[in-house]
Amino acid sequence: MKSADSVVRLFVCSAQKDEVGKEVARALKIELKKRGLKKLFTGGEKHKVRVQTCNCLDLCKQCKKGPGAALVVHPEGTTYGNVKPKDAAEIVQEHLGEGRVVERLRID
């Protein structure tokens, strides 16, 4: 049986009025598939990557009041805010593909 840590999850807030969170999640899934990163090999371990929407990440300033969505990379805990669908390629390539945080979108 695989441990829960063998899965990297991108939780995307979908509580916005304009549904940008759902669009961000869709764009992330497309980019993961396009770049062949639905499975990652990092730190000597293979990880599946899952994109999931959720109702609230308690980051309303980054979601409801901004033009983008908030998302959290789990289990590492990196949090991004004001993410738009056009940012999906950068997050997938930089963060998941190369292991670098996209600083311009990162929030504390």
Image: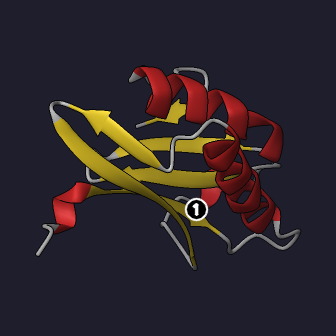
The answer to whether residue 32 shows anywhere in this view is: yes
Q: Quadrant of the N terminus?
A: bottom left
* Residue lying furthest right: 18
- Locate residue 44, reporting x and y percent: 15, 32
Element under disc 1 = strand
Quarter of the rendering containing residue 88: top right
- Locate residue 3, reporting x and y percent: 13, 67
Q: Is residue 84 left or right of residue 76?
A: right
Count of numbered badges drawn on the protein: 1
- Locate residue 33, reporting x and y percent: 65, 49
Q: In this view, does 5 lie to the left or right of 23?
A: left
Q: Mark 1 points at which residue?
A: 12
Quarter of the rendering containing residue 45: top left
The residue that appears at 54% across and 53% down in the rendered structure is: 71
The amino acid beneath tag 1 is Val
Q: Residues within 10 Å of mark 1 (few under 14, many from 20)?
A: many
